[in-house]
Image: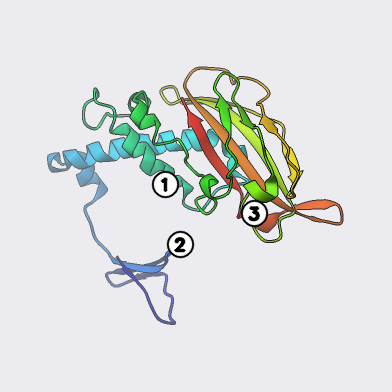
């Protein structure tokens, strides 16, 4: 494909060219390609069918995780989170060393610690990575999902955007069963603090341990607000908010 430059921004089909708009701008590609029927039935496309099946299952696994944390993502996610997460799930699928080609799945691959590690520190908002926002050390208690920041001075420990006056922190403990397509999640109460020099120990403990079995994910959500006349407003519609998988097990 090629990027379209110039003052005329065309969308649609013209002769053998298709013009379309994406997040990367206006692009153009040639028409054509192999028919879906041939790909589905021609023995020469066996590898293509296998790759397609595995990609589809990886995308489904990514969707399952996104749905599990959807309420958090509503406040902190970028426009490419779906593709970024699918890419990682595809890598995790490759750790399935027992299934036949075309049948490898995330549910098997994620049992490998190296595969699970690919999801640790995943930022749902790539424009606001946890490592570039929070500098205070913290710990995660696996049994309860509690995240503890023993010494937290917002004005020193947070890289906050211009205009922010307050910060909110929240944790979540999710269990995702990739084999059966189920999930459960529990949230901590929100801790809201002014961005000042007060040293405030913070403990974010989810209300309960989520039901069910599966892969455990521990997440932290950081939101920025601007207070005007006693009311806190989300800063730039959440563009600076952080959502990170701080631990996985």
- Is residue 92 shown to the viewer in this render? yes
The extreme right residue here reads 229
Q: Which residue in the structure is indicated by mark 1?
A: 84
Q: Residue at x 57, y 42 (%)?
A: 243
Q: Is residue 38 left or right of residue 23?
A: left
Nearest to the observer: residue 221 or residue 22: 221
Under circle 1, the secondary element is helix
Q: Position of residue 35 (x, y in %)?
A: 23, 51
70 versus 36 height, above or below: above
Q: Pointer 1 and pointer 3: residues touching (CB < 8 Å)?
A: no
**Quadrant, the N terminus:** bottom left
Q: Position of residue 103 (x, y in %)?
A: 27, 29
Q: Which residue in the structure is indicated by mark 2?
A: 23
Q: Position of residue 225 (x, y in %)?
A: 72, 52
Nearest to the observer: residue 91 or residue 249: 249
- Mark 3: few/some/many CA within 10 Å (<14, 14-19, 20+): many
Under circle 2, the secondary element is loop
Report the number of numbered marks. Answer: 3
Q: Which residue in the structure is indicated by mark 3?
A: 160
Under circle 3, the secondary element is loop
Q: Position of residue 101 (x, y in %)?
A: 21, 31
Nearest to the observer: residue 14 or residue 94: 94
Mark 2 to mark 1 CA distance (whole Å): 14 Å
Q: Which mark is residue 165?
A: none
Q: Residue at x 43, y 36 (%)?
A: 119
The extreme left residue here reads 44
- Mark 2: few/some/many CA within 10 Å (<14, 14-19, 20+): few
Foreground label between 2 and 3: 3
Q: Residue at x 68, y 30 (%)?
A: 203
Q: Is residue 245 left or right of residue 203?
A: left
Nearest to the observer: residue 13 or residue 241: 241
């Amino acid at each position: 494909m090629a990027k379209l430059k110039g003052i005329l921004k065309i969308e649609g089909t013209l002769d053998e060219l298709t013009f379309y708009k994406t997040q990367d701008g206006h692009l153009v590609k040639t028409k054509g390609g192999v028919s879906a029927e041939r790909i589905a039935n021609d023995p020469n496309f066996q590898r293509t069918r296998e790759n397609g099946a595995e990609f589809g299952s990886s995308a489904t696994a990514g969707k399952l995780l996104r749905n599990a944390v959807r309420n958090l993502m509503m406040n902190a996610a970028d426009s490419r989170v779906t593709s970024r997460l699918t890419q990682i799930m595809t890598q995790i699928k490759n750790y399935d060393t027992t299934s036949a080609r075309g049948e490898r799945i995330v549910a098997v691959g994620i049992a490998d610690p190296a595969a699970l590690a690919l999801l640790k520190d995943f930022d749902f908002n790539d424009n606001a990575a946890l490592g570039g926002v929070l500098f205070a050390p913290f710990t995660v208690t696996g049994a309860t999902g509690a995240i503890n920041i023993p010494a937290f001075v917002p004005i020193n420990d947070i890289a906050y955007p211009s205009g922010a006056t307050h910060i909110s922190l929240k944790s979540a403990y999710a269990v995702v069963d990739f084999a059966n397509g189920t999930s459960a999640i529990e949230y901590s109460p929100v801790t809201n603090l002014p961005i000042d020099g007060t040293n405030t120990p913070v403990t974010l403990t989810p209300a309960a341990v989520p039901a069910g079995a599966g892969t455990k994910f521990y997440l932290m959500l950081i939101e920025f607000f601007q207070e005007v006349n006693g009311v806190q407003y989300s800063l730039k519609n959440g563009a600076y908010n952080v959502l990170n998988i701080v631990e996985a097990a």
